[in-house]
Amino acid sequence: MKLSDFLNQSCANLNHAGQLSPLILSIADAGKQIAVLVAKGKLAGVTNKLDSINVQGEAQMQLDISSHDIFIDCLSTTKLVVGAVSEELASPYYFDGYAVDAPYLVCFDPLDGSSNVAFDGVVGSIFSVLPAPLNAERSEAMFLQQGIHQIAAGYVLYGPATMLVITLGAGTHAFTLDPETQVFELTHPDLQIPAHYPEFAINASRQRFWEAPMQQYIADCIAGEEGVRQCNFNMRWMASMVADIHRILMRGGVFLYPKDRQVTDRAGRLRLLYEVNPMSMLIEQAGGKASTGRASVLGLQPTQIHQRVPAILGSIQEVDLIEQYHQR
Ligand code: AHG
Ligand code: MN
Ligand code: MN
């Protein structure tokens, strides 16, 4: 089934029929354009490091900026979006000429895993769709909505195959881009994450900065059959949240970017609005669970558009157990 047919079918049952479908198609179109740049690699200059630093204090690459511009162009054609928050912009971007009742806000990470670009590693894009408050003044406050209010969320994975994984609030579904027809075809309907799979993803080089519950959890996993878990665990880390979450959606396990004590104003590495919230909705719609260790991600009240939070996402039994380590 083509993405457009899937959207027509799924959106028919939603209040947003006729509007959500063109919005998601515009994001799919952005994904296709970014996939072309990623595939051209150095030939398209995507590996060029720029002199600019983004609001996160990170050096920008040409591909970060080009992907951001593609997202803004594709979203603006819909006239359905009031404003967008992007990882690459300090303040929200407000669209000109949108319909008076333009119903959406979009938060996006145009290029996730950018450190992989330099060596042709896997990258992705992440997006979250929120309702635009009616007649609200344009301000950052519009975007500070709990994750439970997301209308849709998803990512595009630029891997050996380009894949679009979305949720409209009724299951998580994966589409594969046919490189010949340039059509996203539904290949993995209704993904279900196994409740337990003995595999974790964490940047272990930051171990000395983790809190005690995380130290203990990882130590118990590594102890394997000889330890309290009585089970051998595997570890994978792609340095691209899209690639790690994609693997977990497909076969289970848990993704961790926990609270990090090194920098006190940094509750974690990943950004709530355009990384952790959309991924949490996808994970929970696939039967998994998303937590900070102490609270459900989707219930967090955001206070800043680029706010960072601890992220523990994956198989439900494992995330429950990690919350128990925190409670103890
Ligand atoms: P981005 O490239 O958008 O800044 O995001 C990178 C994120 C995420 O994709 C990944 O899981 C994590 O940062 C990697 O962190 P480390 O550099 O600590 O491995
Ligand atoms: Mn990212
Ligand atoms: Mn990014």
Image: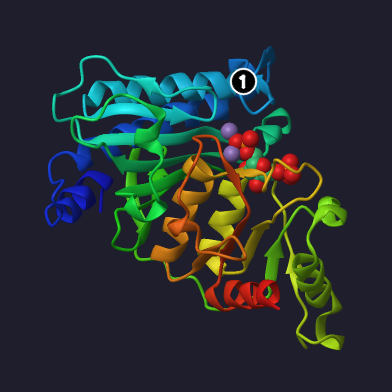
Give the quarter of the image for residue 137: top left
Quick check: can you spot residue 106? no
In the rendered image, residue 165, in percent from the top left (x then y), is placed at 41, 51
* Above-or-below relation of 135 to 319: above
* Residue 227 on image: x %, y %: 84, 85
Q: Position of residue 27 (x, y in %)?
A: 35, 34
Residue 2, relative to residue 125: is it above or below? below
What's the residue at 34%, 49% (across, down)?
150
Please tell me in which quadrant of the rendered image residue 190 appears: bottom left
Residue closer to the observer: 89 or 153: 89
Which quarter of the figure is the N terminus placed in? bottom left
Q: Quadrant of residue 210?
A: bottom right
Query: Please, is residue 152 above or below residue 254 in the view?
Result: above
Task: Check disc 1 and report its element: helix, strand or loop.
Answer: loop
Residue kind at label 1, given as amino acid type? Val
Between 238 and 121, which is closer to the camera in this rendering?
Answer: 238
Residue tagged by mark 1?
46
88 relative to 28 in the view: left or right:
right
Q: Is residue 259 visible?
A: yes
> Which image quarter holds the C terminus?
bottom right
Q: Quick check: 300 above or below 135? A: below
